[in-house]
Amino acid sequence: MNIKKSILLRARIAFLFVVLFAVAVVIKTGHIQFVEGEKWAKMGERISFDYKRVKATRGNIYSDNGSLLATSLPFYKIAFDASLPKEEVFNKGVDSLAYHLSRFFKDKSREDYRRMLIDARRSHKQYIILNRKRIDYQDKKMMMDWPIFREGRLRGGAIFEKVDVRYHPFSNLSSRTIGFINENDKGAGLEFSFDKQLGGQDGYAYYQKISGGIWKPVYDANNVKAVDGLDLQTTLDINLQDVAETALHKAMVQHDADDGLVAVMEVATGEIKAISNLSSDGHGGFYEKFNFAAAGLFEPGSTFKLVTMIALLEDTNMELSDSIDVGDGEFTFYNKTVRDHEDHGLGTVTIKEAFEHSSNVAMAKLVDKHFGLHPQKFVDYIDQLKLSQPLGIQIVGEPTPKIKRPGQKGWSGISLPWMAYGYGFEITPLHTLALYNAVANNGKMIKPVFVRAIKHADEDETKFETEVINNSICSDKTLDQLRLLLEGVVENGTAKNIKGTHYRIAGKTGTAQILDKGRYTKKYVTSFVGYFPAHEPKYSAMVMIKNPRGWYQYGSSVAAPVFKEIADNIYARDINLHQPMDIKKFTKTDVLPVIRAGNQQELTMLCNELGVSNHSLTENEWVRSSRSGNGVNWKKAIEGKGVVPDVKGMTFRDAIYLLEKSGLNVFYEGKGRVQDQSIAAGARVSKGDRIYIRLN
């Protein structure tokens, strides 16, 4: 076979394969179209249409008095179905619509928007996002009056897709406690802990997938409407929260601290009225990044000495008046030295004085003496006080306290003396607060409460009652001694710098070194925890500030003043905390009430009510008083048409009535009764004259 025939044969074979392949394509196409057409059409419809989840509107979070702490505000994303408007409507309004879009969003020129709209129209696009900026409801109402859009959803093509955005009216106030939840359903605080209730029940809507991979909502009778979420009413007092956060922030700035927290609790109910957690941002500012009060584990330091005293008073015959020698403030246990912060030590003192001055040596020696051979007995008291297990609070993420136990790895001879003054284990600040609150609450330990009720409109769906953790933390005798100790700390001990004048505070300071990589550093966690007023406690509170810098690094000088500032503000605002004055102490039977001048009828009625003898020497409506023995006489006051009245001694109400009645323009300063007037009584009045009066 020559070369020509070989090439020709190969060409014919190749052509045959091409023809066969073309025939196969035609046959397969026909089979798909006519035999399997219905199957593929249904599959295409399933791919192009789908039911998608429609998020329910999230419930609101309120403070204790109904102030809004968190809500979902409706915002909108604007899109356009260019295939819906009629040709005449589109051509007539496209220029004007492009102008409005450009003027409102300020991101593109009028011509750019015009080109976008026309291109979408020519391409028959059923969904194009005009701008990704969110607009509010008022903006939406305004846009619905724009050209083309005013024709409505089905004839104008405007698509306003609702997007709920979480909004906090009080900005960052208690933001970590209120919390958040992100798109991945992860979060923190109440938003995350009550997500099921707040989130409601999502609905489903029919969507069509169009060019560009975009899903466009389609109205369908089978759409399932979303059920909005329930509301939370928290226990937070927004005014007290502001006070607490401000006081903490001021101290954090003053001491250049790393982290800090404040928690205020109502003694009888356990309701958390304020909670703030601040951390340094490294640039001189502070923000809430973690809920240290509820989820942080810390060595409590000297605030734990209350537990030590409970164990000692309950398990021994020890009295507060017993003496103990702490020497020069140093004592060695198993080659480890325990030190007091007092220079040169306290020497021999009573146990009460040792507690008031927060002696580490005294607590360590007492615990080693009474529990050294049976350390488990001391740990048992920690268990009985519910300090070794989570409190079970309403915020998810509470950790389990880390309590060392005899026989476990890491337990040594020094472990028990260290525990006596709050080292070698970790608990949350809320554990400490709950214990001190129990002392204020007649020994009853209750769980901290953050949410009072889950509500639907004004109706309670679920109400959270006060939950008792421990009915009695100790005997009544021990409880009385504990109160005496805690009041003594403020009256005579480490916290006497916050000793009050109008009410008494009971509490305990704490200063603990920070453990870093297994070694204690020269950095401290300072704290103060207590309750007030001490005679009839209504609030307990805890303040903790980590790593304060500068000269002041103890709980008495860093944390305690924050507690006092908060307590003073609460005391000033709550009149129910004030003790009534002794009327007999301030009442004098031989002193007449202040009666100087005014309307005779009103003054006569007042004197008759008070049992003061009074006699009238004039029938005039306006009078001045003069004393006559144990009574008063009424004399005519200067007043009349065209003259300046004598208003000295009158109340502001009476004075301004008479002066304006005389045609004078009145200007005043101060408050109380009129002390001086700028124009003498009896002078002639010209219309429009000004008179100045000073009240005192």
Image (cartoon, rainbow, N blue to C red):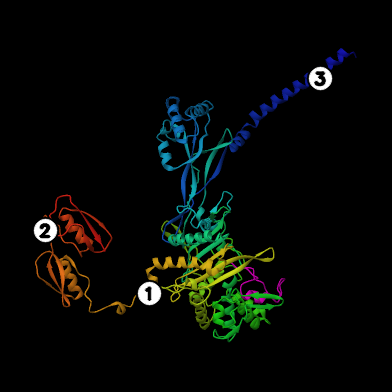
Amino acid type for the residue under numbered disc 1: Gln
The answer to whether residue 160 is above or below residue 234 is: above
Q: Quadrant of residue 470?
A: bottom right
Q: Which residue is mark 3?
A: 13
Which one is in front, 106 or 123? 106
Q: Are marks 2 and 1 in contact (CB under 8 Å)?
A: no
| Quadrant for the C terminus in the image | bottom left
| Dominant secondary structure, magenta | loop
Q: Nearer the viewer, residue 451 or 480?
A: 480
In the rendered structure, which amino acid carries the disc numbered 3?
Ile
Q: Quadrant of the N terminus?
A: top right
Foreground tag (1 vs 3)? 1
Q: Which residues are magenta?
A: 401-428
Spatial distance from mark 3 to mark 2, Cα to Cα? 132 Å
For the residues marked 2 and 1, what is the alpha-carbon distance in whole angstroms?
A: 48 Å
Q: Is residue 410 magenta?
A: yes
Q: Is residue 602 visible?
A: yes
- What amino acid is labelled 2 in the image? Gly
Q: Residues within 10 Å of mark 2 (few under 14, many from 20)?
A: few
Residue 140, located in which quarter of the rendered image?
Answer: top left
Looking at the image, residue 637 sits to the left or right of residue 350; the answer is left
Residue at image position (44%, 42%) is: 136
Q: CA distance from mark 1 to mark 3?
A: 114 Å
Residue 402, percent across and down? 64, 68
Q: Earlier in the sequence, mark 2 or mark 1?
A: 1
In-front residue for pair 593/439: 593
Mark linked to residue 640: 2
Rendered position, 331 above or below 133: below
Image height check: is 60 above or below 268? above
- Residue occupied by mark 1: 579
